[in-house]
Image: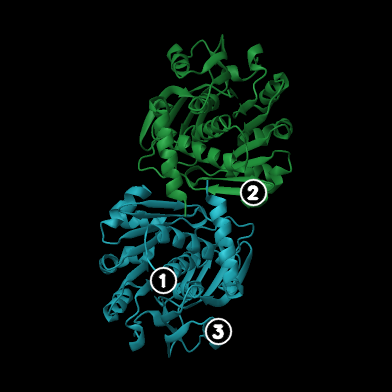
Chain colours: A green, B cyan
Amino acid sequence: MSILVVGTVALDTVQTPFGKAKDVLGGSAAYSALAASFFGKVKLVAVVGKDFPGEFIGSLRAKGIDTKGLQIKKGKTFRWSGRYSYDLNNPETLKTELNLLSGFNPQIPDNYRNERFIFLANIDPHVQLKVLEQLKNPELVVSDTMNYWIEHQKKALKQVIKKTDILALNDAEARELSGEANLIKAAKALLRFGPRLIIIKRGEYGCSLFSRTFSFYVPAYLLESALDPTGAGDTFAGGFLGYLATCKRINESSFKKAIGFGSIMASYTVEDFSLNRLFRLKKSDVETRFKDFQRLTRF
Amino acid sequence: MSILVVGTVALDTVQTPFGKAKDVLGGSAAYSALAASFFGKVKLVAVVGKDFPGEFIGSLRAKGIDTKGLQIKKGKTFRWSGRYSYDLNNPETLKTELNLLSGFNPQIPDNYRNERFIFLANIDPHVQLKVLEQLKNPELVVSDTMNYWIEHQKKALKQVIKKTDILALNDAEARELSGEANLIKAAKALLRFGPRLIIIKRGEYGCSLFSRTFSFYVPAYLLESALDPTGAGDTFAGGFLGYLATCKRINESSFKKAIGFGSIMASYTVEDFSLNRLFRLKKSDVETRFKDFQRLTRF
Protein backbone atom coordinates (compact mmCIF):
# COMPACT_ATOMS: atom_id res chain seq x y z
CA MET A 1 0.00 0.00 0.00
CA SER A 2 1.33 3.47 -0.80
CA ILE A 3 1.85 6.26 1.73
CA LEU A 4 1.07 9.95 1.48
CA VAL A 5 3.51 12.18 3.35
CA VAL A 6 2.82 15.86 3.98
CA GLY A 7 5.20 18.17 5.79
CA THR A 8 8.24 20.33 5.25
CA VAL A 9 11.09 20.01 2.81
CA ALA A 10 13.85 22.28 4.00
CA LEU A 11 17.40 23.46 3.68
CA ASP A 12 19.09 22.75 6.99
CA THR A 13 22.28 24.04 8.50
CA VAL A 14 23.32 21.84 11.40
CA GLN A 15 26.22 21.83 13.79
CA THR A 16 26.98 18.99 16.19
CA PRO A 17 30.12 18.22 18.21
CA PHE A 18 31.02 15.86 15.37
CA GLY A 19 30.74 18.12 12.37
CA LYS A 20 28.75 20.63 10.41
CA ALA A 21 26.47 20.58 7.38
CA LYS A 22 25.36 23.68 5.50
CA ASP A 23 22.23 24.07 3.36
CA VAL A 24 21.62 20.35 3.23
CA LEU A 25 18.40 18.52 2.46
CA GLY A 26 16.12 18.40 5.50
CA GLY A 27 12.54 18.85 6.63
CA SER A 28 10.02 16.57 8.30
CA ALA A 29 8.53 15.31 5.02
CA ALA A 30 11.89 14.67 3.35
CA TYR A 31 13.11 12.48 6.21
CA SER A 32 9.85 10.61 6.68
CA ALA A 33 9.20 10.11 2.97
CA LEU A 34 12.64 8.65 2.42
CA ALA A 35 12.24 6.35 5.44
CA ALA A 36 8.81 5.20 4.28
CA SER A 37 10.12 4.58 0.75
CA PHE A 38 11.95 1.50 2.07
CA PHE A 39 8.57 -0.12 2.61
CA GLY A 40 6.32 1.10 -0.21
CA LYS A 41 5.50 3.76 -2.77
CA VAL A 42 5.55 7.25 -1.26
CA LYS A 43 3.74 10.36 -2.47
CA LEU A 44 5.20 13.59 -1.17
CA VAL A 45 3.31 16.84 -0.60
CA ALA A 46 5.36 19.90 0.36
CA VAL A 47 6.55 23.24 -0.94
CA VAL A 48 10.03 24.51 -1.85
CA GLY A 49 11.33 27.64 -3.58
CA LYS A 50 13.15 28.19 -6.82
CA ASP A 51 16.35 28.22 -4.75
CA PHE A 52 15.91 24.54 -3.91
CA PRO A 53 18.60 22.41 -5.58
CA GLY A 54 17.16 20.22 -8.31
CA GLU A 55 19.57 17.46 -7.37
CA PHE A 56 17.79 17.05 -4.01
CA ILE A 57 14.51 16.44 -5.82
CA GLY A 58 16.33 14.12 -8.19
CA SER A 59 17.75 12.04 -5.37
CA LEU A 60 14.31 11.66 -3.74
CA ARG A 61 12.85 10.62 -7.11
CA ALA A 62 15.70 8.18 -7.62
CA LYS A 63 14.47 6.44 -4.47
CA GLY A 64 11.06 6.02 -6.10
CA ILE A 65 9.34 8.89 -4.28
CA ASP A 66 6.55 10.49 -6.28
CA THR A 67 7.17 14.26 -6.11
CA LYS A 68 4.19 15.43 -8.16
CA GLY A 69 2.81 16.92 -4.93
CA LEU A 70 6.01 18.87 -4.26
CA GLN A 71 5.17 22.47 -5.26
CA ILE A 72 8.07 24.55 -6.55
CA LYS A 73 7.10 28.18 -5.98
CA LYS A 74 8.64 31.53 -6.63
CA GLY A 75 10.39 32.46 -3.39
CA LYS A 76 12.70 30.88 -0.89
CA THR A 77 12.67 27.45 0.67
CA PHE A 78 12.06 27.00 4.40
CA ARG A 79 15.37 27.03 6.22
CA TRP A 80 16.28 25.76 9.67
CA SER A 81 19.56 26.17 11.43
CA GLY A 82 20.40 24.43 14.70
CA ARG A 83 23.19 23.35 16.96
CA TYR A 84 23.53 20.28 19.19
CA SER A 85 25.77 19.97 22.22
CA TYR A 86 26.95 16.57 23.46
CA ASP A 87 23.41 16.06 24.66
CA LEU A 88 22.16 15.07 21.25
CA ASN A 89 18.55 15.00 22.40
CA ASN A 90 17.83 18.70 22.27
CA PRO A 91 19.02 21.06 19.53
CA GLU A 92 19.31 24.77 20.03
CA THR A 93 17.51 26.46 17.14
CA LEU A 94 19.72 29.22 15.81
CA LYS A 95 17.45 30.44 13.05
CA THR A 96 14.11 29.56 11.46
CA GLU A 97 13.20 31.18 8.15
CA LEU A 98 9.69 30.08 7.23
CA ASN A 99 9.81 31.72 3.78
CA LEU A 100 7.35 29.91 1.48
CA LEU A 101 6.10 27.82 4.38
CA SER A 102 4.03 30.75 5.62
CA GLY A 103 0.92 30.75 3.51
CA PHE A 104 1.59 27.26 2.16
CA ASN A 105 -1.66 25.96 0.72
CA PRO A 106 -1.25 22.23 0.16
CA GLN A 107 -2.76 21.00 -3.07
CA ILE A 108 -3.33 17.29 -3.05
CA PRO A 109 -3.11 16.02 -6.66
CA ASP A 110 -6.27 14.23 -7.79
CA ASN A 111 -4.60 10.87 -7.94
CA TYR A 112 -3.39 11.25 -4.31
CA ARG A 113 -6.86 11.86 -2.84
CA ASN A 114 -7.69 8.21 -2.37
CA GLU A 115 -4.53 7.50 -0.38
CA ARG A 116 -5.24 5.51 2.76
CA PHE A 117 -1.99 5.69 4.74
CA ILE A 118 -1.27 9.28 5.66
CA PHE A 119 1.60 10.84 7.55
CA LEU A 120 1.03 14.44 8.57
CA ALA A 121 4.59 15.31 9.48
CA ASN A 122 5.41 18.32 11.63
CA ILE A 123 4.02 21.48 10.01
CA ASP A 124 1.38 24.15 10.84
CA PRO A 125 -1.74 22.24 11.95
CA HIS A 126 -3.82 24.42 9.59
CA VAL A 127 -1.89 22.85 6.72
CA GLN A 128 -2.48 19.40 8.21
CA LEU A 129 -6.23 20.17 8.37
CA LYS A 130 -6.31 21.36 4.76
CA VAL A 131 -4.74 18.09 3.70
CA LEU A 132 -7.26 16.02 5.62
CA GLU A 133 -10.13 17.95 3.98
CA GLN A 134 -8.92 16.91 0.56
CA LEU A 135 -8.62 13.21 1.33
CA LYS A 136 -11.54 10.93 0.48
CA ASN A 137 -10.77 7.77 2.33
CA PRO A 138 -7.96 7.95 4.87
CA GLU A 139 -7.62 4.67 6.74
CA LEU A 140 -4.71 5.40 9.03
CA VAL A 141 -3.62 8.94 9.83
CA VAL A 142 -0.37 9.41 11.74
CA SER A 143 0.40 12.96 12.92
CA ASP A 144 3.44 14.60 14.38
CA THR A 145 3.81 18.11 15.76
CA MET A 146 6.17 20.31 17.79
CA ASN A 147 6.18 22.60 20.82
CA TYR A 148 5.67 25.74 18.67
CA TRP A 149 2.26 24.54 17.44
CA ILE A 150 1.27 23.37 20.93
CA GLU A 151 2.00 26.86 22.19
CA HIS A 152 0.63 28.91 19.29
CA GLN A 153 -1.97 26.84 17.43
CA LYS A 154 -3.40 24.58 20.07
CA LYS A 155 -6.99 24.82 18.80
CA ALA A 156 -6.14 23.80 15.23
CA LEU A 157 -3.76 21.17 16.56
CA LYS A 158 -6.50 19.62 18.67
CA GLN A 159 -8.72 19.42 15.58
CA VAL A 160 -5.94 17.58 13.77
CA ILE A 161 -5.45 15.22 16.68
CA LYS A 162 -9.18 14.47 16.78
CA LYS A 163 -8.90 13.19 13.20
CA THR A 164 -5.66 11.37 13.92
CA ASP A 165 -5.38 7.63 14.49
CA ILE A 166 -1.83 7.67 15.79
CA LEU A 167 -0.20 10.69 17.38
CA ALA A 168 3.60 10.69 17.54
CA LEU A 169 5.37 13.27 19.65
CA ASN A 170 8.36 13.54 21.92
CA ASP A 171 8.23 13.35 25.71
CA ALA A 172 8.45 17.09 26.34
CA GLU A 173 5.68 17.72 23.80
CA ALA A 174 3.52 15.01 25.35
CA ARG A 175 3.95 16.63 28.76
CA GLU A 176 3.24 20.12 27.42
CA LEU A 177 0.16 19.13 25.41
CA SER A 178 -1.36 16.99 28.17
CA GLY A 179 -0.30 19.03 31.18
CA GLU A 180 0.86 15.79 32.82
CA ALA A 181 4.48 15.29 33.91
CA ASN A 182 4.22 11.50 34.14
CA LEU A 183 4.39 9.83 30.73
CA ILE A 184 1.74 7.19 31.41
CA LYS A 185 -0.66 9.85 32.64
CA ALA A 186 0.27 12.08 29.69
CA ALA A 187 -0.47 9.27 27.25
CA LYS A 188 -3.82 8.54 28.89
CA ALA A 189 -4.77 12.22 28.65
CA LEU A 190 -3.73 12.36 24.98
CA LEU A 191 -5.75 9.23 24.17
CA ARG A 192 -8.78 11.17 25.38
CA PHE A 193 -8.12 13.72 22.60
CA GLY A 194 -9.17 11.05 20.10
CA PRO A 195 -6.29 8.95 18.73
CA ARG A 196 -6.20 5.16 19.02
CA LEU A 197 -2.50 5.21 19.74
CA ILE A 198 -0.01 7.61 21.27
CA ILE A 199 3.68 7.19 20.50
CA ILE A 200 6.00 9.02 22.87
CA LYS A 201 9.47 9.40 21.38
CA ARG A 202 12.37 9.75 23.81
CA GLY A 203 15.32 10.34 21.52
CA GLU A 204 18.33 8.24 22.43
CA TYR A 205 16.28 6.52 25.14
CA GLY A 206 13.80 4.81 22.83
CA CYS A 207 10.06 5.21 22.72
CA SER A 208 6.78 4.03 24.16
CA LEU A 209 3.47 3.20 22.57
CA PHE A 210 0.16 3.52 24.40
CA SER A 211 -3.29 2.37 23.37
CA ARG A 212 -6.41 1.95 25.46
CA THR A 213 -5.71 -1.77 25.75
CA PHE A 214 -1.95 -2.27 25.59
CA SER A 215 1.41 -0.54 25.95
CA PHE A 216 4.80 -1.22 24.50
CA TYR A 217 8.29 0.07 25.30
CA VAL A 218 11.49 -0.15 23.30
CA PRO A 219 14.94 1.15 24.10
CA ALA A 220 16.78 2.91 21.29
CA TYR A 221 19.16 0.92 19.13
CA LEU A 222 22.49 2.02 20.60
CA LEU A 223 25.09 3.31 18.18
CA GLU A 224 28.82 3.50 18.44
CA SER A 225 28.81 6.61 16.33
CA ALA A 226 25.98 9.17 16.30
CA LEU A 227 26.73 12.24 14.22
CA ASP A 228 23.50 14.18 13.79
CA PRO A 229 20.10 13.36 15.30
CA THR A 230 18.20 15.77 13.04
CA GLY A 231 15.23 14.01 11.46
CA ALA A 232 15.42 10.93 13.70
CA GLY A 233 11.82 11.40 14.87
CA ASP A 234 10.61 11.93 11.30
CA THR A 235 12.39 8.85 9.98
CA PHE A 236 10.99 6.94 12.93
CA ALA A 237 7.45 7.88 11.89
CA GLY A 238 8.18 7.18 8.22
CA GLY A 239 9.51 3.73 9.01
CA PHE A 240 6.64 3.08 11.42
CA LEU A 241 3.88 3.94 8.94
CA GLY A 242 5.83 2.46 6.04
CA TYR A 243 5.91 -0.92 7.74
CA LEU A 244 2.22 -0.75 8.69
CA ALA A 245 1.31 -0.08 5.06
CA THR A 246 2.84 -3.46 4.18
CA CYS A 247 0.72 -5.38 6.70
CA LYS A 248 -2.29 -7.39 5.55
CA ARG A 249 -3.88 -7.00 8.97
CA ILE A 250 -2.97 -4.26 11.39
CA ASN A 251 -3.08 -5.35 15.00
CA GLU A 252 -1.12 -5.10 18.25
CA SER A 253 1.67 -7.25 16.88
CA SER A 254 2.07 -5.15 13.73
CA PHE A 255 2.09 -1.92 15.74
CA LYS A 256 4.92 -3.30 17.88
CA LYS A 257 6.93 -4.43 14.87
CA ALA A 258 6.29 -1.04 13.27
CA ILE A 259 7.82 0.62 16.32
CA GLY A 260 10.83 -1.64 15.84
CA PHE A 261 11.20 -0.68 12.19
CA GLY A 262 10.73 3.00 13.04
CA SER A 263 13.47 2.75 15.67
CA ILE A 264 15.82 1.12 13.18
CA MET A 265 15.23 3.78 10.54
CA ALA A 266 15.89 6.48 13.14
CA SER A 267 19.10 4.74 14.19
CA TYR A 268 20.41 4.89 10.64
CA THR A 269 19.50 8.56 10.27
CA VAL A 270 21.68 9.70 13.16
CA GLU A 271 24.73 7.89 11.76
CA ASP A 272 25.34 10.74 9.33
CA PHE A 273 24.27 14.30 8.61
CA SER A 274 21.14 15.12 6.63
CA LEU A 275 19.62 12.12 4.81
CA ASN A 276 23.04 10.88 3.75
CA ARG A 277 22.92 7.55 5.57
CA LEU A 278 19.40 6.83 4.34
CA PHE A 279 20.42 7.47 0.74
CA ARG A 280 23.19 4.87 1.12
CA LEU A 281 20.96 2.39 2.94
CA LYS A 282 19.77 -0.91 1.46
CA LYS A 283 16.54 -2.68 2.33
CA SER A 284 18.59 -5.68 3.41
CA ASP A 285 20.42 -3.47 5.97
CA VAL A 286 17.05 -2.60 7.46
CA GLU A 287 16.03 -6.25 7.73
CA THR A 288 19.36 -7.22 9.28
CA ARG A 289 19.33 -4.50 11.92
CA PHE A 290 15.67 -5.17 12.70
CA LYS A 291 16.46 -8.82 13.48
CA ASP A 292 19.48 -7.69 15.48
CA PHE A 293 17.24 -5.29 17.40
CA GLN A 294 14.78 -8.08 18.23
CA ARG A 295 17.62 -10.22 19.52
CA LEU A 296 19.09 -7.29 21.50
CA THR A 297 15.86 -6.65 23.35
CA ARG A 298 14.20 -10.04 23.82
CA PHE A 299 14.41 -11.88 27.11
CA MET B 1 22.03 -20.85 45.91
CA SER B 2 22.56 -18.20 48.59
CA ILE B 3 23.96 -14.72 48.00
CA LEU B 4 26.48 -12.71 49.98
CA VAL B 5 25.88 -8.96 49.95
CA VAL B 6 28.45 -6.48 51.21
CA GLY B 7 27.92 -2.73 51.26
CA THR B 8 26.38 0.03 53.32
CA VAL B 9 23.43 0.00 55.66
CA ALA B 10 22.44 3.60 56.27
CA LEU B 11 20.02 6.05 57.72
CA ASP B 12 18.73 8.15 54.83
CA THR B 13 16.93 11.45 54.75
CA VAL B 14 15.39 11.98 51.35
CA GLN B 15 13.30 14.70 49.79
CA THR B 16 11.57 14.39 46.42
CA PRO B 17 8.83 16.53 44.84
CA PHE B 18 6.42 13.90 46.15
CA GLY B 19 7.35 13.77 49.81
CA LYS B 20 10.03 13.43 52.42
CA ALA B 21 11.44 10.65 54.58
CA LYS B 22 13.70 11.23 57.59
CA ASP B 23 16.20 8.79 59.08
CA VAL B 24 14.78 5.85 57.17
CA LEU B 25 16.44 2.57 56.35
CA GLY B 26 18.77 2.89 53.37
CA GLY B 27 22.20 1.94 52.08
CA SER B 28 23.41 -0.06 49.10
CA ALA B 29 23.50 -3.37 50.96
CA ALA B 30 20.09 -2.96 52.57
CA TYR B 31 18.38 -2.35 49.23
CA SER B 32 20.24 -5.06 47.35
CA ALA B 33 19.94 -7.65 50.12
CA LEU B 34 16.20 -7.17 50.37
CA ALA B 35 15.82 -7.39 46.57
CA ALA B 36 17.95 -10.54 46.41
CA SER B 37 15.97 -12.11 49.25
CA PHE B 38 13.03 -12.61 46.86
CA PHE B 39 15.15 -15.17 45.04
CA GLY B 40 17.23 -16.94 47.68
CA LYS B 41 18.89 -16.89 51.07
CA VAL B 42 20.88 -13.68 51.61
CA LYS B 43 23.82 -13.09 53.94
CA LEU B 44 24.47 -9.47 54.75
CA VAL B 45 27.83 -7.92 55.63
CA ALA B 46 27.82 -4.28 56.74
CA VAL B 47 28.34 -2.04 59.75
CA VAL B 48 25.93 0.13 61.72
CA GLY B 49 26.15 2.04 65.00
CA LYS B 50 24.40 1.68 68.31
CA ASP B 51 22.03 4.42 67.09
CA PHE B 52 20.65 2.10 64.42
CA PRO B 53 17.03 1.16 65.17
CA GLY B 54 16.69 -2.49 66.10
CA GLU B 55 13.38 -2.63 64.29
CA PHE B 56 15.20 -2.12 60.95
CA ILE B 57 17.36 -5.15 61.64
CA GLY B 58 14.28 -7.04 62.72
CA SER B 59 12.45 -6.25 59.50
CA LEU B 60 15.39 -7.45 57.39
CA ARG B 61 15.55 -10.65 59.46
CA ALA B 62 11.83 -11.12 59.08
CA LYS B 63 12.47 -11.31 55.34
CA GLY B 64 14.87 -14.19 55.92
CA ILE B 65 18.07 -12.16 55.60
CA ASP B 66 20.95 -13.53 57.66
CA THR B 67 22.38 -10.55 59.56
CA LYS B 68 25.19 -12.34 61.41
CA GLY B 69 27.62 -10.35 59.25
CA LEU B 70 26.05 -7.04 60.23
CA GLN B 71 28.43 -5.52 62.76
CA ILE B 72 26.86 -3.27 65.39
CA LYS B 73 29.63 -0.99 66.64
CA LYS B 74 29.95 1.76 69.15
CA GLY B 75 29.46 4.95 67.20
CA LYS B 76 27.09 6.37 64.63
CA THR B 77 25.59 4.80 61.56
CA PHE B 78 26.46 6.10 58.09
CA ARG B 79 23.95 8.79 57.09
CA TRP B 80 23.08 10.16 53.68
CA SER B 81 20.78 13.03 52.95
CA GLY B 82 19.69 13.97 49.44
CA ARG B 83 17.10 15.82 47.44
CA TYR B 84 15.61 15.05 44.03
CA SER B 85 14.02 17.56 41.68
CA TYR B 86 11.46 16.49 39.07
CA ASP B 87 14.37 14.94 37.22
CA LEU B 88 14.39 11.85 39.38
CA ASN B 89 17.57 10.54 37.78
CA ASN B 90 20.07 12.65 39.71
CA PRO B 91 19.85 13.46 43.41
CA GLU B 92 21.60 16.42 44.95
CA THR B 93 23.56 15.15 47.95
CA LEU B 94 22.91 17.47 50.87
CA LYS B 95 25.02 15.70 53.46
CA THR B 96 27.14 12.58 53.78
CA GLU B 97 28.23 11.50 57.26
CA LEU B 98 30.48 8.48 56.91
CA ASN B 99 30.69 7.87 60.68
CA LEU B 100 31.47 4.17 61.28
CA LEU B 101 31.91 3.61 57.56
CA SER B 102 35.35 5.19 57.70
CA GLY B 103 37.63 2.50 58.97
CA PHE B 104 35.08 -0.25 58.41
CA ASN B 105 36.92 -3.55 58.44
CA PRO B 106 34.58 -6.17 57.05
CA GLN B 107 34.68 -9.47 58.90
CA ILE B 108 33.29 -12.30 56.87
CA PRO B 109 31.88 -14.90 59.30
CA ASP B 110 33.44 -18.33 58.81
CA ASN B 111 30.28 -19.87 57.47
CA TYR B 112 30.03 -17.10 54.81
CA ARG B 113 33.48 -17.71 53.35
CA ASN B 114 32.39 -20.38 50.92
CA GLU B 115 29.66 -18.23 49.38
CA ARG B 116 29.74 -18.32 45.59
CA PHE B 117 27.39 -15.52 44.54
CA ILE B 118 28.77 -12.22 45.75
CA PHE B 119 27.44 -8.70 45.41
CA LEU B 120 29.94 -6.00 46.32
CA ALA B 121 27.52 -3.10 46.58
CA ASN B 122 28.72 0.50 46.46
CA ILE B 123 31.26 1.11 49.23
CA ASP B 124 34.97 2.01 49.48
CA PRO B 125 36.80 -0.31 47.06
CA HIS B 126 39.31 -1.13 49.83
CA VAL B 127 36.43 -2.69 51.75
CA GLN B 128 35.41 -4.59 48.63
CA LEU B 129 38.97 -5.90 48.28
CA LYS B 130 39.10 -6.99 51.93
CA VAL B 131 35.93 -8.97 51.39
CA LEU B 132 37.28 -10.68 48.31
CA GLU B 133 40.44 -11.67 50.20
CA GLN B 134 38.36 -13.55 52.76
CA LEU B 135 36.33 -15.53 50.23
CA LYS B 136 37.46 -19.02 49.30
CA ASN B 137 35.49 -19.84 46.25
CA PRO B 138 33.60 -16.97 44.65
CA GLU B 139 31.91 -18.07 41.43
CA LEU B 140 30.18 -14.89 40.34
CA VAL B 141 31.22 -11.49 41.69
CA VAL B 142 29.03 -8.51 40.84
CA SER B 143 30.38 -5.07 41.81
CA ASP B 144 28.89 -1.63 41.90
CA THR B 145 30.58 1.68 42.62
CA MET B 146 30.04 5.44 42.43
CA ASN B 147 31.68 8.58 41.06
CA TYR B 148 33.37 9.36 44.40
CA TRP B 149 35.47 6.15 44.27
CA ILE B 150 36.23 6.65 40.59
CA GLU B 151 37.62 10.07 41.44
CA HIS B 152 39.38 9.27 44.72
CA GLN B 153 40.20 5.54 44.80
CA LYS B 154 40.68 4.62 41.17
CA LYS B 155 43.62 2.31 41.78
CA ALA B 156 41.82 0.18 44.40
CA LEU B 157 38.67 0.30 42.31
CA LYS B 158 40.51 -1.08 39.30
CA GLN B 159 41.81 -3.95 41.45
CA VAL B 160 38.24 -4.73 42.46
CA ILE B 161 37.07 -4.59 38.85
CA LYS B 162 39.84 -6.95 37.80
CA LYS B 163 38.39 -9.53 40.19
CA THR B 164 34.82 -8.76 39.18
CA ASP B 165 32.75 -10.88 36.82
CA ILE B 166 29.98 -8.36 36.31
CA LEU B 167 30.42 -4.63 36.80
CA ALA B 168 27.24 -2.61 37.26
CA LEU B 169 27.39 1.17 37.11
CA ASN B 170 25.37 4.07 35.80
CA ASP B 171 25.96 5.83 32.50
CA ALA B 172 27.80 8.83 33.95
CA GLU B 173 30.08 6.52 35.97
CA ALA B 174 30.74 4.36 32.90
CA ARG B 175 31.74 7.46 30.95
CA GLU B 176 33.93 8.78 33.77
CA LEU B 177 35.70 5.50 34.44
CA SER B 178 36.33 4.67 30.79
CA GLY B 179 36.94 8.17 29.46
CA GLU B 180 34.56 7.39 26.60
CA ALA B 181 31.42 9.48 26.01
CA ASN B 182 29.71 6.86 23.83
CA LEU B 183 28.18 4.04 25.87
CA ILE B 184 29.16 1.22 23.50
CA LYS B 185 32.75 2.45 23.46
CA ALA B 186 32.65 2.93 27.24
CA ALA B 187 31.44 -0.65 27.72
CA LYS B 188 34.16 -2.01 25.43
CA ALA B 189 36.79 -0.10 27.37
CA LEU B 190 35.43 -1.37 30.70
CA LEU B 191 35.39 -4.97 29.44
CA ARG B 192 39.15 -4.57 28.93
CA PHE B 193 39.47 -3.94 32.70
CA GLY B 194 38.57 -7.59 33.24
CA PRO B 195 34.85 -8.26 33.79
CA ARG B 196 32.87 -10.66 31.60
CA LEU B 197 29.89 -8.35 31.60
CA ILE B 198 29.26 -4.63 31.95
CA ILE B 199 25.84 -3.42 32.98
CA ILE B 200 25.17 0.26 32.32
CA LYS B 201 22.21 1.52 34.31
CA ARG B 202 20.32 4.50 32.91
CA GLY B 203 17.77 5.23 35.63
CA GLU B 204 14.29 5.81 34.24
CA TYR B 205 15.58 5.00 30.75
CA GLY B 206 16.41 1.37 31.42
CA CYS B 207 19.76 -0.33 31.11
CA SER B 208 22.15 -2.10 28.78
CA LEU B 209 24.25 -5.18 29.15
CA PHE B 210 27.50 -5.71 27.25
CA SER B 211 29.66 -8.81 26.96
CA ARG B 212 32.39 -9.62 24.49
CA THR B 213 29.92 -11.67 22.44
CA PHE B 214 26.47 -10.15 22.92
CA SER B 215 24.60 -7.07 24.05
CA PHE B 216 21.16 -6.54 25.47
CA TYR B 217 19.03 -3.43 26.02
CA VAL B 218 15.90 -2.98 28.08
CA PRO B 219 13.79 0.10 28.64
CA ALA B 220 12.70 0.79 32.20
CA TYR B 221 9.33 -0.46 33.36
CA LEU B 222 7.32 2.77 33.22
CA LEU B 223 5.41 3.74 36.33
CA GLU B 224 2.40 5.93 36.79
CA SER B 225 3.68 6.94 40.19
CA ALA B 226 7.37 7.21 41.09
CA LEU B 227 7.99 8.62 44.57
CA ASP B 228 11.65 8.06 45.40
CA PRO B 229 14.34 6.54 43.17
CA THR B 230 16.83 6.04 46.01
CA GLY B 231 18.17 2.50 45.95
CA ALA B 232 16.78 1.65 42.52
CA GLY B 233 20.23 0.73 41.19
CA ASP B 234 20.98 -1.38 44.26
CA THR B 235 17.69 -3.25 44.07
CA PHE B 236 18.35 -3.75 40.38
CA ALA B 237 21.65 -5.45 41.19
CA GLY B 238 20.11 -7.46 44.02
CA GLY B 239 17.34 -8.75 41.78
CA PHE B 240 19.80 -9.40 38.97
CA LEU B 241 22.18 -11.52 41.05
CA GLY B 242 19.32 -13.04 43.04
CA TYR B 243 17.78 -14.42 39.88
CA LEU B 244 21.14 -15.71 38.59
CA ALA B 245 21.67 -17.61 41.84
CA THR B 246 18.50 -19.58 41.08
CA CYS B 247 19.69 -20.68 37.63
CA LYS B 248 21.01 -24.20 37.08
CA ARG B 249 23.09 -23.00 34.17
CA ILE B 250 24.12 -19.40 33.68
CA ASN B 251 24.21 -18.33 30.05
CA GLU B 252 23.19 -15.47 27.76
CA SER B 253 19.51 -16.21 28.24
CA SER B 254 19.76 -16.19 32.04
CA PHE B 255 21.73 -12.93 32.03
CA LYS B 256 18.96 -11.30 29.96
CA LYS B 257 16.22 -12.62 32.24
CA ALA B 258 18.25 -11.46 35.24
CA ILE B 259 18.29 -7.96 33.76
CA GLY B 260 14.52 -8.20 33.46
CA PHE B 261 14.13 -9.24 37.11
CA GLY B 262 16.55 -6.52 38.21
CA SER B 263 14.52 -3.93 36.32
CA ILE B 264 11.31 -5.12 37.94
CA MET B 265 12.77 -4.98 41.43
CA ALA B 266 14.01 -1.44 40.74
CA SER B 267 10.57 -0.43 39.48
CA TYR B 268 8.99 -1.51 42.77
CA THR B 269 11.60 0.34 44.81
CA VAL B 270 10.78 3.74 43.33
CA GLU B 271 7.07 3.34 44.06
CA ASP B 272 7.65 4.35 47.67
CA PHE B 273 10.27 5.86 49.96
CA SER B 274 13.04 3.78 51.54
CA LEU B 275 12.48 0.01 51.28
CA ASN B 276 8.79 0.38 52.07
CA ARG B 277 7.47 -1.02 48.81
CA LEU B 278 9.87 -3.95 48.91
CA PHE B 279 8.77 -4.87 52.41
CA ARG B 280 5.15 -5.02 51.22
CA LEU B 281 6.05 -6.92 48.05
CA LYS B 282 5.12 -10.56 47.39
CA LYS B 283 7.06 -12.97 45.22
CA SER B 284 3.95 -13.42 43.10
CA ASP B 285 3.95 -9.64 42.38
CA VAL B 286 7.48 -10.00 41.03
CA GLU B 287 6.49 -12.88 38.76
CA THR B 288 3.44 -11.02 37.47
CA ARG B 289 5.28 -7.82 36.67
CA PHE B 290 8.13 -9.75 35.06
CA LYS B 291 5.70 -11.42 32.66
CA ASP B 292 4.05 -8.07 32.04
CA PHE B 293 7.47 -6.58 31.30
CA GLN B 294 8.24 -9.32 28.77
CA ARG B 295 4.93 -8.64 27.02
CA LEU B 296 5.51 -4.88 27.12
CA THR B 297 8.86 -5.12 25.38
CA ARG B 298 8.60 -8.05 22.97
CA PHE B 299 8.01 -7.49 19.28
Residue type indicated by callout 2: Phe
* Nearer mark to the viewer, of 2 and 3: 2
Considering the numbered disc 1 on the image, is that residue within a helix, a strand or a loop?
A: helix
Considering the numbered disc 2 on the image, is that residue within a helix, a strand or a loop?
A: loop
| Label 3 environment density (alpha carbons within 10 Å; few <14, some 14–19, many ≥20) | few
* Nearer mark to the viewer, of 3 and 1: 1
Above/below status of B87 relative to A119: below
The residue where tag 1 is placed is B245
Q: Is residue A102 left or right of residue A63?
A: right
Please state the chain letter of the residue tagged with numbered disc 1 in the rendered image.
B
| Label 1 environment density (alpha carbons within 10 Å; few <14, some 14–19, many ≥20) | many
Residue nearest the viewer, comparing B59 with B27: B59
| Label 2 environment density (alpha carbons within 10 Å; few <14, some 14–19, many ≥20) | few
Q: Is residue A276 left or right of residue A135?
A: left
User: What residue is at 39 percent from the left and 42 percent from the top?
Assistant: A223
Residues indicated by labels 2 and 3 sit on the same polypeptide chain: no
Residue type indicated by callout 3: Ala
- Per the rendering, the mark at residue A214 is 2
Q: How many marks?
A: 3
The residue where tag 3 is placed is B62
Please state the chain letter of the residue tagged with numbered disc 3 in the rendered image.
B
